[in-house]
Structure formats: structure tokens, C-alpha cells
């Protein structure tokens, strides 16, 4: 076959309708405070793990709420569970429980 | 008229002054009680107002010149008692005097959020952290922004939402004016110190009112002010007294560190001290945010659940000078109608 120099790129857009939202729904039930997030970035700004590795807790839980969970499993392991993110959150999101529940959901749902 | 009806206004900020002038102009006898020794409240402290940059003092001066013969302004007094009787109200003051009144207006305004409470931002701990109110005081004195080392800063950070939109300090509400104040002050710093870089750290820029967005545009286009969408998580002091800021640059999705020479905290509104006590004495409803509630936000926004007691200006929550004056005029109109017709 002739090579035209094209290849098929995976879709970069968030395909909200097709995404598997089981973990999203699990979190919405077990830690509804996540829904109060206003995306201010305080959690990421203070995160111990995020300053040394490309780990971004705000981006991770925002993606999660869109049903984007493919990077969740390797990423969430980087969290050291120090709780600093929760201390600074202006909306009182219970981030430690978000992370705890995420780990549990990954165990169950995979 | 044999017995002129008398109205007592508590608080001589712009809301109280504008209400007083309008009521006196309508022929009522007006008495004002002010806890400080001058009129104007906070507006007198602001060097130049957004968005027009008219001096705060000029607005206060205009309202003072239009008091239409308000009979009495009592300075240095607070209210210690409010008694309702058939004739109206008997109000007692901290200097042991009292007055009767047919109607009362609570115009006690607000108080600036105490930035010490947000310890992680270092106000009162680090020398180069100031508030927007401190900056206005400096501008008013005609001084230039100077670090604790006596140098002009080469980079200043402005932090939005200090004490507002923050459940950790118990204030969920937005203070409405600090975005515009911050953008105005960013421009003023650049005007004063053209070599100094200015960075604003915000969550949302609420430039909602007329001419506000244009001010934002001007800040970017004419003054090169930089805007970073991220809320300050931490501020720490370096050995040379400069400040290390930690935030997330949410638009790039990466944590961001930046050193600045000075930090300006854009402090929000909290209810004025004493307003709650007045509300308790008079039986007024206090909202969950600590500001006073009106009878009906659409149709009776200056009356309260107590007939004859009215509220106006920032005592009802964060507001701009323009809106406080408009509210005051509406209050005077409502009171005039209430005294004449009973509703
Ligand atoms: C940093 C900052 C900058 C601002 N800059 C601008 C700007 O540029 N443009 C703009 O439109 N708005 C600005 N504002 C908002 C502006 O300050 C308010 O809109 C305005 O002050 C509201 O007026 P007021 O009369 O309702 O309240 P206040 O100004 O608070 O006046 C209340 C008065 O009541 C008195 N008082 C309080 N309690 C009692 C009591 N118990 N007994 C007797 N008297 C009492 C006080 O001493 C005061 O004189 C700014 C606010 C802040 C925090
Ligand atoms: S608990 Fe995890 S996500 Fe939160 S600040 Fe600590 S390392 Fe970061
Ligand atoms: S600190 Fe709270 S509100 Fe801000 S991005 Fe993180 S979870 Fe959301
Ligand atoms: S006006 Fe702006 S700075 Fe003030 S509380 Fe609202 S969003 Fe924050």
C-alpha cells in the first residue's frame, strides 16, 4: 500500500457521551463535595507530588468528572496522601476522600 | 408643618450621606449618627475610584455639599438602644444622649476583611505583603510603592479573592468590587513605576459592570499587566524579604513558582462591627453571610421586616460607590412614600 504520510491519530477531544463514567458516578455518590470545585488550582499549586512529577490533582479530578479515566490508575499512585491540597481548597472539597475513593473505585472497577 | 417628621440615619458613609441629603431635600428633619469623627466612610479612604478614577474624596465632598440642611450630624457615637413605641422610635447613643425618630435608616456599611486571618499569605508576618486598602492609603499620601528595603519593587503580585469566595474563612460570597479594584491598582502601579512588572492572580475576573471590562482591556493593552488564572496556595519569604508564590497556572495546567518583591492582597467585604448588635436591638433579619436582609429584594429592597426601619448601601452586602448612591436615593424615595402614605 502506498504510504501517504498520514496516520490515524487517536481522538484528542473529550468524547463525553462515549466515556465510561462508572468511576465518575461512584465518586459523585461517595464524595459529592468534588462537585463544588471551581478549578482554582490551589490544590495543584500546593501539592507535594505535583512539584516534582507531572502530577496534577486538579486536572486529574476535572478529567475524572468528564469521564476521562485512562490515566487515572498510574497517576493517582503518585499522591502521597499528605492532605495539603485539602487544607487550601476554598470550596472545602474533601480531596483526601476523593483520592481514597478513587483508589477504591480503581480496585473495584479497574 | 408644625411637627416635622424626623429620620435618624446610622452611618455617614456615602450611602448614609446620600440618603440624608435626599430626605432633607424632601422636607424631613434628618439626624445622622456616625461612629467616626468624619463622614464618607470607606470611600474617603480610596484615592481614586474605579472605573472613572475620580477621587473618592470628591464624591464624598459632593454629597456633603448636598445635605440640604441636614440638622444634626453626631460624630463619635454608636447606637446603644432602639426602642419602638407608638410615636415611632427612641434611639439611645453611646454618649448617653437619645433622640426620637419616625423612621430609622441603617447605613453602617462594611468592614474590610482582616488579612491576618489568611495566615498562609503572610500579612503581618512578611514585611512586603500589604492589602489593597493599605495601597490606597499610600496612593492618597502621594507616596510611591516601596519595599521594606526602601527600594521600588521590580515585580508586584496582586492576589484576588482574599477573604472572599473562601469557605475556609467562612465567606462563601464574592465581594464584587475587588476585581475592579485590583485591575485599577495594577494600572496605577504601572503608571507610578513603569519598570515594575505586575501580575494578577485570579480565579475569575468579575468585571461585570459598565466600563469594567474596558478597564481590564486597558490594563492589558496599555499597561501590559499580566493575568494568571490560579489562586495563590502559599506565599513564603526569602532571606532577602522577597516573596515566593506557589500557585497553579490553571490555563497551562502546571504548578507555577514566582518570586515577587511585593504582594498586594485584594481584601473583600465583611459586615461592619456593630451591625449585628443594631440588628439584634432593632429586630432586623441578618442573612447567612452576616449582611442585613431587606423585606423583598425585588419590590422592597430598602425596607425591613420592622416597619419604619430601612437599610441602605453596603450594609446589605458588597456594592460599588455608584450602586450605593443609587440605593440611597431609592431608600429616600421609599421612606418618603412610607411616611406620607404608610406604605
Ligand atoms: C479596597 C477597596 C477599594 C474600593 N474601591 C472602590 C472604587 O474604586 N469604586 C467603587 O465604586 N467602590 C469601591 N469600593 C467599594 C466602596 O468602598 C463601597 O461601595 C462604599 O464604601 C459603600 O458605602 P457605604 O456608605 O454603604 O459603607 P461605608 O463606606 O462602610 O460607610 C459606613 C459608615 O457607617 C459608619 N458606621 C459603621 N458602623 C456604625 C455604627 N455602629 N454606628 C454608627 N456609625 C457606624 C462607618 O464609620 C462609616 O462611616 C472599594 C472597596 C474596597 C474594600
Ligand atoms: S494529598 Fe496527594 S494530591 Fe493532595 S497535596 Fe498531598 S500529594 Fe498532592
Ligand atoms: S483547591 Fe478545591 S476548588 Fe480549587 S481546584 Fe482544587 S479541588 Fe477545586
Ligand atoms: S470581585 Fe473578584 S476578587 Fe473580589 S471576591 Fe469576587 S471574584 Fe474575587
Image: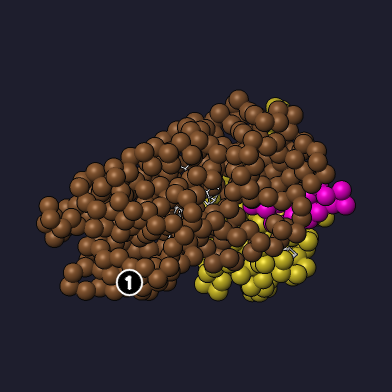
Chain colours: A yellow, B brown
Whether residue A70 is visible here, answered yes or no, is: no
Q: Is residue B235 above or below residue B292?
A: above
Magenta stretch in the rendered image: B228-247
Write the residue at 44% across / 57% down.
B75
Q: Position of residue A83 (x, y in %)?
A: 71, 69
Q: Is residue B284 above or below residue B208?
A: below
Residue on which the image places disc 1: B82
Residue situated in front as seen by the camera: B76 or B86: B76
Q: Is residue B211 above or below residue B38?
A: above
Q: Can you say which quadrant of the picture contains the C terminus of chain B?
A: bottom left
Write the residue at 67% across / 31% down.
B192
Residue situated in front as seen by the camera: B243 or B79: B79
Q: Does mark 1 have its CB less than 8 Å from ligand 1?
A: no
Whether residue B166 is visible here, answered yes or no, is: yes
Write the residue at 35% across / 55% down.
B32
Q: Position of residue B327 (x, y in %)?
A: 33, 48
Q: Position of residue A84 (x, y in %)?
A: 72, 66
**In the image: residue B325, left or right of residue A110:** left
Write the residue at 74% across / 29% down.
B195
Q: Residues within 10 Å of mark 1 (few under 14, many from 20)?
A: many
Is-magenta flag for residue B62?
no
**In the image: residue A88, left or right of residue B9:** right
Amino acid at each position: 500500500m502506498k504510504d501517504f504520510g498520514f496516520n490515524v491519530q487517536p481522538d484528542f477531544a473529550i468524547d463525553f457521551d462515549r466515556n465510561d463514567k462508572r468511576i465518575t458516578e461512584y465518586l459523585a455518590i461517595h464524595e459529592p463535595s468534588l462537585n463544588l470545585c471551581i478549578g482554582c488550582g490551589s490544590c495543584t499549586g500546593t501539592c507535594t507530588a505535583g512539584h516534582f512529577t507531572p502530577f496534577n490533582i486538579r486536572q486529574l479530578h476535572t478529567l475524572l468528572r468528564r469521564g476521562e479515566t485512562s490515566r487515572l490508575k498510574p497517576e493517582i499512585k503518585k499522591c502521597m496522601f499528605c492532605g495539603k491540597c485539602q487544607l487550601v481548597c476554598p470550596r472545602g472539597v474533601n480531596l483526601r476522600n476523593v483520592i481514597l475513593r478513587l483508589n477504591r473505585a480503581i480496585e473495584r472497577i479497574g | 408643618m408644625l411637627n416635622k417628621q424626623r429620620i435618624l440615619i446610622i452611618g455617614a458613609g456615602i450611602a448614609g450621606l446620600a440618603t440624608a441629603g435626599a430626605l432633607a431635600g424632601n422636607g424631613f428633619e434628618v439626624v445622622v449618627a456616625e461612629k467616626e469623627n468624619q463622614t464618607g466612610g470607606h470611600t474617603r479612604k480610596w484615592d481614586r475610584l474605579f472605573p472613572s478614577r475620580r477621587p473618592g474624596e470628591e464624591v464624598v465632598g459632593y454629597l456633603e455639599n448636598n445635605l440640604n440642611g441636614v440638622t444634626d450630624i453626631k460624630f463619635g457615637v454608636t447606637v446603644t438602644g432602639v426602642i419602638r413605641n407608638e410615636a415611632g422610635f427612641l434611639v439611645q447613643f453611646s454618649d448617653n444622649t437619645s433622640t426620637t425618630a419616625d423612621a430609622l435608616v441603617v447605613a453602617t456599611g462594611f468592614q474590610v476583611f482582616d488579612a491576618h486571618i489568611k495566615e498562609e499569605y503572610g500579612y503581618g508576618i512578611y514585611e512586603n505583603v500589604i492589602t489593597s486598602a493599605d495601597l490606597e492609603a499610600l496612593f492618597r499620601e502621594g507616596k510611591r510603592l516601596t519595599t521594606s528595603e526602601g527600594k521600588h519593587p521590580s515585580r508586584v503580585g496582586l492576589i484576588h479573592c482574599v477573604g472572599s469566595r473562601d469557605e475556609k474563612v467562612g465567606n462563601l460570597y464574592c465581594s464584587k468590587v475587588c476585581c475592579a479594584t485590583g485591575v485599577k491598582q495594577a494600572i496605577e502601579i504601572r503608571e507610578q513605576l513603569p519598570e515594575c512588572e505586575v501580575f494578577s492572580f485570579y480565579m475569575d475576573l468579575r468585571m461585570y459592570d459598565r466600563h469594567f471590562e474596558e478597564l481590564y482591556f486597558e490594563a492589558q493593552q496599555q499597561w501590559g499587566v499580566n493575568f494568571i488564572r490560579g489562586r495563590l496556595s502559599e506565599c513564603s519569604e526569602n532571606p532577602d524579604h522577597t516573596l515566593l508564590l506557589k500557585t497553579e497556572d490553571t490555563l497551562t495546567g502546571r504548578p507555577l513558582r514566582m518570586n515577587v518583591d511585593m504582594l498586594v492582597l485584594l481584601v473583600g467585604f465583611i459586615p461592619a462591627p456593630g451591625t449585628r448588635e443594631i440588628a439584634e436591638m432593632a429586630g432586623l433579619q441578618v442573612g447567612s453571610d452576616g449582611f442585613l436582609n431587606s423585606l423583598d429584594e425585588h419590590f422592597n429592597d430598602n425596607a425591613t421586616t420592622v416597619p419604619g426601619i430601612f437599610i441602605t448601601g453596603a450594609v446589605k452586602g458588597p456594592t460599588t460607590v455608584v450602586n450605593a448612591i443609587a440605593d440611597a436615593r431609592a431608600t429616600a424615595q421609599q421612606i418618603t412614600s412610607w411616611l406620607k402614605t404608610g406604605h
